[in-house]
Structure formats: structure tokens, C-alpha cells
Amino acid sequence: MQTVAEHTEVVDLVRWINDRTAGLVYQSDERSQLAVGCFDVALEHQAAIAVLHSSELYGSAFALIRVLSESLVRGLWLYQCATEVELTKFRKGHIGKDFGTLVAEYEKKIGTPGGVFSSFKLSAWNQLNDFTHTGFLQVSRRHKHGRVEGSYSDQDLQKALGAAGALGLIAAVQLVSIAGRQDLLPSFLDRMSAYAKADSGG
């Protein structure tokens, strides 16, 4: 298996997050419950990416990065931005807004227009779509020395694992915040800082 160190780091992170978010109690209002559901799905996708990587099912792991990011951003938007009418539309399966709009509205709401998620969308969204929808980037990695099988570079895999780790941490911080557990936030922020340094090679 490639990128053993990065994989071990993500697995450790998944366990660390689970240990600190298991048993959290949330508000029962609809907005909180919908957002919490999104963040929990995001964490499941994070864990699934680690499992898929360990099984060398790299194509499926890559396909989930976009899905993970959508779960996270939907949760952020539902909690911070959605009107009551939009919450009702979401329950009926009709948000009516694309990923870029959700990002823009969320970042405007928290006062960081053109922020981290906008940069993420600008730099990675087209590639993520390609991997999720079996575009050229995904298909071109199915050939290896005359055989049809996954062929993903260490750099590709490092980026995927790094994204899964970072996005999952953001989702976990949201869960802690919604649960009102301010006492847990410093440890999460420290872990985010340490993870960012490790992911960047710092």
C-alpha cells in the first residue's frame, strides 16, 4: 500500500475525532438537527476514504472527496444561512443552489468572502467532479503497464488523504460548537493546526 504514513495519520485522526464527538448532545431544533446530520455524514465519508485507501480502492476514495466536501458545506450553509423556507425546501429535497452558491453565501455570512472554501472550489472542484463522475482524470488512472487497474501517484493519494483529514476536522469542530462544548474547542483547534503543518510538510 502506498502512502502508509499519511494513511496512518488519517486513521488516527478518525479515531481521535470519534473519541471526542461520541455522546455529544445537540439542540433539538430542526436547523441544528439537519446541520448535525450533514456533519456526521461528512465524518462517515472521511472514515470511508481511509477504509477504501487501506483496501487500495483508490478510485472510490477519490470519488468520495467531492461528496465529503458537499456534506460539509451543506451543513455549514443549513446552520448559518438557510431561511425557514429553504429549510423546508431541503426537507423536500430541493435546495436549488449549487455548491459555489452555498460557499459564497456561507462565507459572506461569516464575513470571509473569497475565503478557504472559495479557494478550495477554485483549485479543486473541477478535478473532484472529474473523479466523482468518472471523467478523464479518473479514467486515465485505470491503466498500469498494460493492465487495467488503478494507478494513482503518491502525490495524488497524499492530497486525497490530506483533504479528507482537513475537511473531517472542520466538520467535527462544527459538531462540538453546535453541542455547546466550548471546553473541547481548544484541543480541536490545536489538532487542526498540527494537522495542517503535517499535511504541508512543515
Image (tube, rainbow, N blue to C red):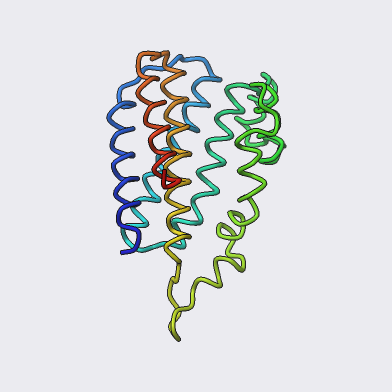
Q: Nearer the viewer, residue 191 or 81?
A: 191
Judge whether residue 181 can be spotted in this image: yes
Does 156 appear above or below 198? below
Q: Nearer the viewer, residue 178 or 127?
A: 127
Residue 121, position as x, y percentages in the image: 64, 44
Considering every residue shown, the one lying at the far front of the view is: 202
In the image, taking residue 28 as reference, residue 14 lies left or right, namely: left
Residue 170, position as x, y percentages in the image: 47, 32
Does 168 appear above or below 63? above
Q: Residue at x 40, y 51 (%)?
A: 49
Which quarter of the picture shows residue 175? top left
Location of the N terminus (image quadrant): bottom left
Considering every residue shown, the one lying at the far bottom of the view is: 146
Q: Residue at x 63, y 49 (%)?
A: 123
Residue 56, position as x, y percentages in the image: 35, 63
In the image, taking residue 81 as reference, residue 159 lies left or right, namely: left
Q: Nearer the viewer, residue 83 or 106?
A: 106
Q: Residue at x 44, y 56 (%)?
A: 61
The mark total stands at: 0
Judge whether residue 45 can be spotted in this image: no
Residue 68, position as x, y percentages in the image: 50, 43
Which quarter of the picture shows residue 91? top right
Location of the C terminus (image quadrant): top left
Q: Residue at x 47, y 53 (%)?
A: 159
Q: Nearer the viewer, residue 92 or 9?
A: 9
